[in-house]
Every structure is written in C-alpha cells, then in structure tokens.
Image: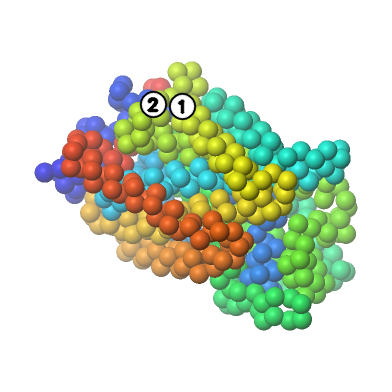
Amino acid sequence: MTMERSVGQGKSSPSMGYDVAGRDDVHKLHTKAVGLIGVLFLTVTGSAPISAMLFNVPIVIGNGNGFGAPAAFLVATVVLLIFSIGYCEMAGKVSAVGGFYSFISHGLGRELGMGFGFGSVFAYSMFEVSLAGGFAYFGNVDILQWTGINVPWPILALAMIAGISVLTYFDVKLSTAILGVALVCEVAILIIFAIGVFAHAGNGANVQLSALNPVLALQGFPAQGKLAAGAAGIGLFFAFWSWVGFEMAPNYAEESKDPKRIVPLAMYISVVGLGIFYTVLCWAGLSAYPKLDDAINVAQNNSAVFFFQPATQFIGSWVTVAMSVLILTGSFACGMAFHNTAARYFYALGRERLLPASLGKTHPVHRSPHVASFVQSAIAALCIVIYALHDGWNDPNGQAYIGVYGLFAVIGVVIILAAQAVVSLAIIMYFRTHHREEHHWFKTLVAPLIAFVTQAYVVYLCLSNMDFLGGGYKLANYIVWIDLAVVGIGIIGAFYIRATNPKKFDEIGRLIYEGLPDGSK
C-alpha cells in the first residue's frame, strides 16, 4: 500500500516526512521573508499591469469586442474570482513552493502532477523569454528615438536576462523591493491616464456606462469599410491573458510570514484589484476616442500609440514619455517575477529529485534558489540566441515583438490556462478524498466546477484562434504539440519512477511547508 493511500482520508502529516520545515536533508528557502505586501508585489507584477494594458487592450478593442471590451475584462474578473475560491481553499491546506504541480499531485495523482509540474516550469521559463522580447523591442525604439543609436534587440534582451540573473541571486527581499517600486510607478501613471480621460467626459472623451454591460463580452462586431471584424473569442482570450501571473502566490508560501493566511488573501486582492483596475483602464482607453470607429481604427492599424495619443491630448506629452519608460521597467519587472516563479518550480522539482538534485539547493546566505535561478537564466538566454540566429536581429518589430514576445507568450499561456482548468478538478477531488469533513458544496465543488468549464472554454478560445495569436509564424503550428510533449514527458517520467523507485514516487508533489514554531528559523 502506497503512502498516499495510507493517509488518503486525512491531512498530509508532517510525521510522514512530507513537511520540510523540520527536515535537515532538504535545502529550504528564506522562511518568513515577506509579508502580504511582498507577496502582492511578487505576484501582481507578474501580471504586468502596464504591459497588459498597452499590449492587450488595443487587441481586445480592435480585434475582439469593440465597444464591449471593458465588459470582457469584467467577465474575466468574475470567472477568475470564482476560480480563486477553490484555489484559495487548496492553498490553505497545501503550502508548497510547487504551486500547480503540488495541487494537481495532491488532487489528481502524482503522474498528472508531475506532468503539469514540467509544463508549468516550461511555461514560466518561456514567459521570461517573451518579456525579454518585449523589453528589447521598446528599448530599441526608445534608444533610437532618444540617441539615434540602433541597438540590436538581442543585446537588449540578453542584458535584461543578465540583470535579472544578478538580482535574483540575492535574498527574495531584494526582488520584492524592486518589483514593488516598478508596480507602484506603473499603477500611478495608469491611474493618471484614467483620471485625465474621465475628467474630459463630454469634452472630447466619450464615456458611456453601457460599455460595462456583461452581455457585450460575448459579442464581436462586423467588418465596416477598411476595418476588419472583431471576434468575441479573441477579446475574451486577451482579457484572461492579462491576469497570467496572479496565480503565482502559492509559489511563495514557504517564504511568506503566514502562508495559510497571506497566500489566499493575496490571491483575492490580486484578482479583484486587477479586475477593477483593468476594467476601468480599458473603459478609459475606449472612452478616450470620440467615436468607436476611431478607437478600432487606431487599435487595428497603430496599436503602439493607442494609449500614447490620448495621453498627450488630455494630459500632456510627459505622460507619454513616462509610459514609454515604464513599459521598459514594467517588462523587466514582469520578466523578473516570472523568472522567480520558474526558478522555484525548478527548485521544487530538484529537491524532490525529479530533476538534478543540485537545482534543489539554496544559497547559504541569501536562501535563494540560486542554482535553479542560474539555470533559468541560461535557458532564457539560449532561447534568445537561437531565435536571433534563426530569424535575424535587424527587425525589432517583427522579430522581438511579434516573434519573441508574441510566440513565446502563447507557448506559456496555453499550458497555464490548461493547468488552471485541471487544478479546478484537482481541488474537487482533493477535498472529497483528503478533507471530506471540510468539503463545502460551493467552495470546493460548485465554484471549482464552474472554474473548470470556463477555463476549459478559454483554452478552446486560444486553440481556435491560434492563427491570429501566432501572427502567421510557422512556429505557431507546433505550439500545442510542444506543450503536449513537455507535459507528456513529465507524465511518462512519473510512471517510470513509480515502477523503478516507489519511495521516490511517493514524494512527487508532496513536499509541503507547514511552518516552524514562532522564533524558529
């Protein structure tokens, strides 16, 4: 009888050796290093508010829902809030750096857990590459505009990866401080933009409350003249895409001061806070244009200036300059947030010996997963070099922005959205199996079930719009197969370990952190 069956009707017991808090044979992260604000900085920055708005809103308006774009963000808020209900219940029981990997392993079995563990680390690893492409594109444009020097985009992308590698080598508190400053600046400039637009309601700005009608989230718009038609599916997908990163809170459970309280609270604040913020900002962006056709035209044909143009008109050119700078710091901060999460997945898989054990080591002073962090940096840099050698480095827009930023983001998003759907099922099974006495009809059944259906639908939207999302690149045709291969390797590996090393198999996704007594380190 396996260890899982012997404890199947109760909580995972530290006495069974799963709790790493009191073990000396496992390298541990810096415990009690960050509080609620720190976890929020580490996770919300991963959603990259300024990147989400400047990159995604023009697409939601110009290629998706048109007038109903704000409603798409509103509906996404409600769906993700429902998802968070079960997710937070699970986080309250399983405090582990593995995130999706640990949750799925506890709820649906070690095999599927290891599959999505490999998938998750791959996804977050690709997100850093994606953000390096976005950073390189905007960096090239800004440097060329300000100095007249054309810096090849791969140099800028590699510089960002190197900078992140150095910073994440140190204590997680340093990352928290840097991400916090970047996040505050991003939010501040976007709030200034929204206030500037709404202050001109009826005087250049066309503010209509009906744009928030949830029904409009399910509607696109027909082609008109030179304007292409919009599809509701594209709008909804990009709205959901804007939240990717908020789900990383459980990955910092071992480093937070009170994981059972902080992680769920950070999740709720992230979802609701970002939801309100995104909806209002999208509404402001739409309202900044006197006519809907004007907004759609700019969104479809010159999306880079969608926010810059009204910012200069209603507030001043200084806001546009600030946004140009903050999109760089925002991309860097977002890349660092994803780097941190990828490193912690590598660390979790390394300390359970599912990847080389050296990945599971932490720095003796900073308690950072420094080996895993360096490996992640090497992977990201290698991806940039290979892409540049294959596609070139003289076209920042086509290569860095559409190619690297776009394609590598889609590679990761497909896995994360699928993982969120699978996690919803894992939550249901976990509480029915391990905590039957705490099983709640809504929190651990109805809410996760709704989340599964809606998240599965978003995955369908992604797959059905792959031609658009892939930007016409051949790599887009292989994205789904690449993702399936990565998850499949993890699943096959778990079956192999079960057959050859049952003791090792028992620990897959099971190492949790219940915490040390107050005053312990």
Q: Which residue is mark 2?
A: 358
Amino acid of disc 2: Ser
Task: Report the residue at 57% width, 54% height from top.
Answer: 407
Q: Quadrant of residue 505?
A: top left
Tell me if 502 is positioned left or right of 184 in this view. Answer: left
Is disc 1 surrounded by few (<14), some (14 to 19) or many (20+) residues within 10 Å?
many
Task: Report the residue at 45% width, 18% height from top.
Answer: 364
Q: Report x, y in % for residue 149.
A: 83, 38
Task: Report the residue at 61% width, 62% height from top.
Answer: 472
Q: Report x, y in % for residue 192.
A: 78, 52
Quarter of the picture containing the C terminus is top left
Q: Report x, y in % for residue 339.
A: 53, 38
Quarter of the picture containing the N terminus is top left
Q: Quadrant of residue 281?
A: bottom right
Amino acid of disc 1: Val
Dots 2 and 1: beta carbons under 8 Å?
yes
Above or below residue 187? Residue 294 is: below
Give residue 371's mark.
Answer: 1
Q: Earlier in the sequence, mark 2 or mark 1?
A: 2
Circle 2 SS class: helix
Q: Report x, y in % for residue 134.
A: 66, 47
Residue 232 visible (yes or no): yes
Q: Nearer the viewer, residue 163 or 49?
A: 163
Above or below residue 333? Residue 402 is: below
Q: Nearer the viewer, residue 319 or 496?
A: 496
Task: Report the residue at 84% width, 64% height from top.
Answer: 200
Q: Nearer the viewer, residue 58 or 103?
A: 58
